[in-house]
Structures are given as C-alpha cells and as structure tokens.
Image (cartoon, rainbow, N blue to C red):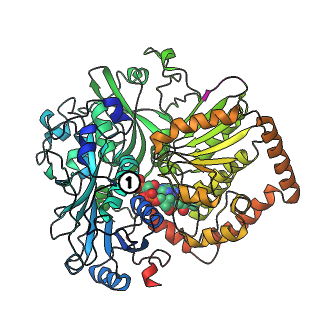
Amino acid sequence: MLWTPPTNPAAARHGAAPADLAAASAVVDVGADAGATSRPLRILLLAHAFNSLTQRLHVALRAAGHQVSVELDIADAVTEEAVALADPDVLIAPFLKRRIPEAVWRQRVCLVVHPGPPGDRGPSALDWALLRQRPPPVAGPVAAAPDRPLGPDMAAPLSWGVTVLQATADFDAGRVWAWQAFAVRPEATKASLYRHEVVQAATRATLAALQRWRPGSLAPAALARPLAEPAQRTGWQPLVTRAMRQIDWARCTADTVLRLVRSADGAPGAAAQLLGQPVRLFDAQAATMAECAAARGAAAGSVLARRGPALLLRCADGPAGPGAVWIGQVRRDSAAAAASASTVAPLKLAATLAFAAEAAALPEWPVPLMRQAAAAATPQGGDLAGGAGAWDELHYSEFGPPRARVGWLEFNFHNGAMGERACRRLVEALRWARGRDTQVLVLAGGADFFSNGIHLHEIEHAASVAGDSAAEASLRAIEAIDDVALEILTLTDRLSVAALRGNAGAGGCFLALAADRVWAHEGVVLNPHYKNMGNLYGSEYWTYTLPRRIGAEAARALMQGRLPLGAAQAAAQGLIDDCFGADREAFEPQLAAAALALAGAPDWPARVQAKQAERAADEARRPLAAYRADELAQMRRNFFGFDPSYHVARHHFVHRKPHAWTPRHLATHRR
Ligand code: COA
C-alpha cells in the first residue's frame, strides 16, 4: 500500500485533502526564515504549451504582484536566450516535456511543478494515481502487464499531491520547496483532475515556494520547522504504456474499462478495437443496471446503441451482472494510422461521428432532459426510459418553491467543444426549459469547461468528408452556436445566470455573456478573445454583449490583449458579475443558494420588467440580427478569404503541433 486511504471517503469525494496529508503538506504560510524576501519577483514561466496550469499561474502570479513573462520550450538555445533577455529571479516550469538546460538551472533558481507528492517521480504521475485507485476487480490487462504489475498490494492512493521542486540533472529529483496534498475524486478523468485539483494545489504550492526565495541564492530559505513529507514514497514510476491500457472487451469489466479510459483521458486514450478498427477511447461513462441488463446476450465488444455523441459497448460481466459502457469520444489509433496508407491524421471525435455510418444504423436510446428521481429507476427498465443515473451530456433539474423556482441546465459537452449537433441539442433544451415555470434559469455548462466555443475537431474532420469543407463547416458551426446565444439573449420572461464551474474560452466565454448574470469561482480562467485562433473575428453576438458590459475601449483592449483572465479580475473589471468560492466544490452550493435568492427576490418582477424594457430599447436601437450579420460577414472572410491564418491555426491546434515560437503577447521579454 502506497498511501493510507483517507478515513472519510465522503471528504475525499468532495475534494478536501485528507487530514494526514494536509497536515504534512506545506501550503502558503511556509514560515520561511528572515533570509526570505516578499518583494515582487521577475518570473519566467517556461512551458511546453500555454496550457491550463500555465495560464492559471500566469493569472495568480500577476495578481500577487510579480512580473511574469512566458517562454514556450522549443530548444535549449532558445530557452537560454530567453533567460538572458528576461533575467528572471525565478524560472518556473509548470508543464515541460524536456529537461531544463543545465546552463540555466546551475545559474538560476528553476522550480519544476510535478503532479505527484514528494518522492514521486516519472512522466505518468497522474495516470498511476488513477490506475491504482482501486485494485482491478478481475485480472485484466493492467494486472497482466509485464513491466508494472498492479495488484491489491498497490491499491488505492485516494490522496495525491503536487510538488514544487528545484530542477537538477535528474527528473523530479531536486530539493522540495513546497508541496500540497489533494484528494483524488474517484470518478475523475486524468484531465479533469489536472484542471481542477492539480491546478489548484500547484498554484498554492508555487506561491508558497516563492516565499522561500532569497536574493542571490540558489537555495531556499530555511523553514521554521522542517517540511513534512509523506511517510511512503512511490519513487520513479515508468511511463504507462499502451499495452498496460489495452482493452480486451471479453476480459475487462465495466469498472476496469472506466478506470483504464479515465486514467488516459485526455491523452493518450486507452487502446481498443471498435467496430473492427484500432482506436483510442475517451470519455467513458457508466451504463445503468437496466442498460447493462439489455446488453445481456450480446457479444463482447459489440455496439448496442447510441446516445448523443456516445456508443454503448458490451464488455465483460462484473459481479453485478452483464457489463456495458458508453464511449463518448474516439480517435483512430495513431500507430495503426501511421502503419496504414492513410494520409488523414487521426482526430479525437464523437464516437457517433467517427463511425457515422455504423452509428446511424444503431437504435437510439434517448433519455429525458429532466430525468426521474433515482428511486423511480428500476433495474427492469426504468433507467432505459431515463432514470436519474442515466448518462447524457445534457441534464436539467429544478429546485425551489413555486414562484421562486430555479431551473438548472447542465451541458457537459466533451472539452467544452460545441459542434452543430451539440448546439442543436442545446437550443432544443433551452426551448424546452423555457416552457417550465421557473423564475431563474442557471446555465451550468460543463463540470470541466463552461464552453470553449465551436468544435474545431469536427470542423477539421469536415475537410476530409467528400462534398464538405472546413470553411463550410466553420460557418455552419458558428450559425449553430449563434442560435444558442440568441435563445439566451431572448429569454426575457425570467432571469438567466451563466455559472462558470470550469474555464471558458473564445466563443464559450461570449456565450456566457449572453446571460443576465455571469458568476464564477476563483479557480476559473477565462480567455475572452478569439485572435489566438488565427485572427478569428468572433461571433456569438460579442459585439453587442461585450461593450455593453465593459465599454468599447476596454472591449478593444481585452480582444487585442489575448491574455487569460482570472475570474476575480474579470469581476473587478465588470466582465462578469460575481466571483465566489475558492473552487468548484465551494462554488456549487453557494451558486444554488444565490440562484434561489435571485428567484425569490422581492424585486424579481421589477428586474424582469427592466430587462424586457432594456432588450426592447436595444432592439429598437440596433436589432440583434444586425450584430449577427456584421459578425458573420467578418467571419466569412476568416473562413473563405485569402488569408488562411484561421485554417492554419486550427490545423495546428487540433493536431497538437508543437510551437515554433512564443507569441509576443506572452513573451514580454522579447518585445
Ligand atoms: N474545439 C475542439 N476541441 C477543443 C476546443 C474547441 N473549441 N477547445 C479545446 N478543445 C480541446 C483541446 O483539443 C484539448 O483536447 P484533448 O482532450 O485532446 O487534450 C482539450 O479540449 C483541452 O484543451 P487545451 O487547449 O489543452 O486546454 P487549456 O485549458 O490548456 O486551454 C483554451 C483552453 C480555451 C485556451 C484552448 O483550449 C483554446 O484556445 N481552445 C480553442 C478556443 C477557440 O478558438 N474556439 C473557437 C472559436 S469560438
């Protein structure tokens, strides 16, 4: 056993660090000795990509008063040049795939963020944390993997951590400056754990580590009391290989499939055969007992039904009976694609799109938007008809007394990407929700992302479909997301709240601004701009909603600045209305209470009246259709014009092409 599991699993589920590890980890108040400094520092962030953690640190370090610049890790000589130009007090590496050059770490304080507790080392830290959460229920391929067998003795690290350590010649082996524990959510994917718990813990540990910086020294200030470290150490853990996560439908129970896929989601996915093709699987969701029972008699690996983006696959029987799982996203296996003559690079796509012809022939098992209470679902078929436990990307619920009632609409589109299919479903859901007797509609988006705008992978895919093109697909996608924004803007008989439980980017940010109120928690990072995607002009009625909130001048600066914005800053600037709660767990109950208060406020009728009057006045001044037409005219130039920047940027983004240079708006040391 590597870690002592937390004594309170409920606390673990809700993100609280187990008491023993929380006590051991060093957070913001590190009690550094008198040699430490609290002056603002010059910080260079060195990262493989400007990813979610790097963005969050960019936001948090600037908010703490530090001067921050970014260099993307391209080559040793380029990094050395950047260090010479930036002359940083500290170099921080939140996300690297290569070593920091020795010439740099020998001269400067270089702090590496490792997503594991002290003593953990290696490139697959989070994968291992999730794979070992519980012992495999049956001997599956993970247990059989020759190079790293898993067994009950290695089970269950329900708590994990993030360490900030000094760069040395060896990976993850330097001196620990600070670390922070967190509890592993049992059903989280690797990417979700990274975006929430890791980002949160890393931000706290990095701020703590900086308190130990001393002018002119490579060593940290000593602590008033020594940094406690976990009693058990994992040591070096190898890369989790493809073979360790190969899914054999006949041998893997649903529990094993879910665990293997989640440990590899967002990358590289778990390897499997699907409809005769070698693929990588993502976005695996549990099937209900009724759905599993309906799969009885089907052959292992066969596909039984479709719902939204997902296909239902039969897997091995578990202790409770027949097994089945929903698979939402797939990518053709890169290794298999490379071995074939195909020139089309594999993309992560909805399973129903990647296997469109086969999916069309399958029965659809839809579930109602507002699913029944759990008690009403029966193993005999209640869940097939839509029990509360039935998975779908859309879900609606209601709470509150009559005349102070809140509707709560979640749209968990994978990665916050909204293609035509997703937008059409959301428009239908909004129209349905409109018919409900509620005073407030909360648009709760997805748990990981509120939204990231149009689905760029689907658009890229259209380029390889006969008779279609990326330009045409882009236009269709923008029209579809504009329809969603229009539904929200014209919902004038009640108040709407966009609740950002996760980050929002580009069109997804502006979709949120279509609501009357925009609320977020302190961990949310917004990217309220489009230009990073090949100078895209943008739509979603942003030319109406953004200046209305912050004025024309600030709107221009925000769009040109192309920087991530923390929710607290966004609230201070008036871009959003409020920011409360340290993270999603703290935010959700406060959000529900605030929505209830809004729905039951004595001045609710006056607020709705004022909203209707404002909308009518705005419409008379300039119709929404005119904003949309002007935005789309600009977008047509992006899609169909002579400048291919958007198509090039999208291609690079969806294929994860490494950066060749650091954009100047990030690399302030290069201006
Ligand atoms: N369409 C399709 N996939 C998208 C997406 C979009 N609009 N936005 C993000 N994703 C996917 C990424 O490909 C990635 O996939 P993975 O599961 O294979 O890793 C995943 O979502 C996470 O994105 P990533 O870029 O790693 O997240 P981040 O937190 O580091 O950065 C953003 C967030 C929003 C800054 C960045 O994802 C982005 O620029 N997205 C594009 C936004 C955009 O231009 N939309 C179109 C105009 S409306």
Amino acid found under the numbered disc labelled 1: Val
Residue at 61%, 37% in the rendered image = 594
Q: Residue farthest to the front?
A: 34
Prevailing secondary structure class for the magenta stretch in the rendered image? loop
Dot 1 surroundings within 10 Å: few (below 14), some, or many (20 or more)?
A: many
Up-down relation of residue 169 to residue 490 (above or below)? below
Residue at 60%, 77% in the rendered image = 643
- Element type at mark 1: helix
Q: Nearer the viewer, residue 47 or 364?
A: 47
Residue at 65%, 31% in the rendered image = 406
Q: Give the magenta-colored segment's residue range.
A: 398-402
Q: Nearer the viewer, residue 332 or 23?
A: 23
Q: In this rendering, would 84 be left or right of 372?
A: left
Up-down relation of residue 427 to residue 92 (above or below)? above
- The residue that mark 1 highlights is 199
Whether residue 507 appears in this view of the structure is no
Please say whether residue 186 is one of the residues in the magenta stretch: no
Residue 480, position as x, y percentages in the image = 65, 51
Q: In this rendering, would 107 be left or right of 188?
A: left
Up-down relation of residue 231 to residue 301 (above or below)? below
Q: Nearer the viewer, residue 182 or 264?
A: 182
Residue 84, position as x, y percentages in the image = 33, 85
Residue at 12%, 42% in the rendered image = 149
Residue 497, position as x, y percentages in the image = 65, 43
